[in-house]
Amino acid sequence: MASQLPDDFKCPISLEIMSDPVILSSGHTFDRASIQRWLDAGHRTCPITKLPLPEPLPSFPTTPSALEEKLNSLDQLSRVSKRDSAIRRRLAESGPKVGLVAEGVVGKVVYALRCGVGDSRAVAATVLTSLAVLEVNKVTIGSYPDAIPGLVFLLQMGNSRERKEAATALFTLCSFPDNRVRAIQYEAVPILIQNANSGLERAVEVLGLLAKCKPARDEMVRFSGFLDILIGIVRNGSSRGVQYALLTLSFLCCYSKRMGLEALREGLFETCVGLLDDDNEKVRRNAKTLIQVLQGKRENV
């Protein structure tokens, strides 16, 4: 598996995936445990360049160029791990993602969300998505002061790729309930609705998670035209977009009598009946749930 990973993630000493990478003054990166053993053995030079090394080991690089290089490497790791389940399991077992978060990388990545140049803002959001695959990292990243606000900022101010990556990161983080509350507090709901209206279906996926929270439902019910946006996605969106639009509508129509009645007037009940034969099992299941909700509204008219 190691041969499939970017070289930046292999320690030149151990040739294994690094769980706690540090960059030396010579410019080369090593796993902290390996380079510490090298120093403890009495060596005072870089194993590669033979240049003198300082006594204390440095932490994760903070210069813009070094940070951008590491972000790109993490982006490569994210792409490789998405394609191969064996690599994902090995990464979880070896702990590089946990080590990176524990080392304080989140602060550098979050800084790039707002202040990065070129592709680095989108890459920073992708890195947060990759790190947040592990449940323990969802907690750590979400509690970082500017992580979720930074993603909401990028969702509002970024280009199309940056907004998509920011929405994906929020979706991954918001599977942890406390992060939903944080996203709502930082006014993610109206920004997500605006993105959904602009055609970003990934925003609907996040709204489907946030709709589990009453404060988010209150905002969604008040947002003029949101019902029409969701119905439009149900009728014309991708399979995944339809799935989450139905989920969101189920929460809202169950919560708000007014929205349920409006949905009935718009013919959503009939639309859902047509989706009961959809190829996607989750679409069928969510359509059935929404039908049951709308039937309840119909009987109470």
Image: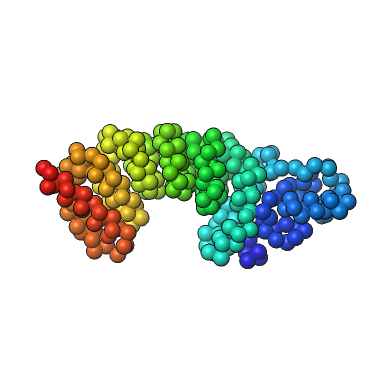
Identify which residue is drawn at 73% across, 61% down: 15
Apparent side of residue 43 relative to residue 1 in the rendered image (left or right)? right
Apparent side of residue 54 relative to residue 15 in the rendered image (left or right)? right
Identify which residue is drawn at 27% across, 48% down: 250
Q: Is residue 238 visible?
A: no
**Residue 283 spot, x, y in % from top left:** 30, 58
Q: In the displayed structure, would residue 146 be above or below residue 19?
A: above
Q: How is the image coloured?
A: rainbow
**Residue 32 spot, x, y in % from top left:** 74, 50
**Residue 237 spot, x, y in % from top left:** 31, 53
Q: Nearer the viewer, residue 237 or 24?
A: 24
**Residue 221 spot, x, y in % from top left:** 27, 37
Q: Is residue 283 visible?
A: yes
Identify which residue is drawn at 55% across, 47% down: 137
Apparent side of residue 66 relative to residue 124 in the rendered image (left or right)? right
Q: In the displayed structure, would residue 50 be above or below residue 54?
A: below
Q: Nearer the viewer, residue 160 or 267?
A: 267
Where is the N terminus found, in terms of image quarters? bottom right
Image quadrant assignment for residue 255: top left
Identify which residue is drawn at 35% across, 47% down: 208
How many numbered marks does the figure carry?
Answer: 0
Where is the C terminus found, in terms of image quarters? top left
Apparent side of residue 132 relative to residue 183 in the rendered image (left or right)? right
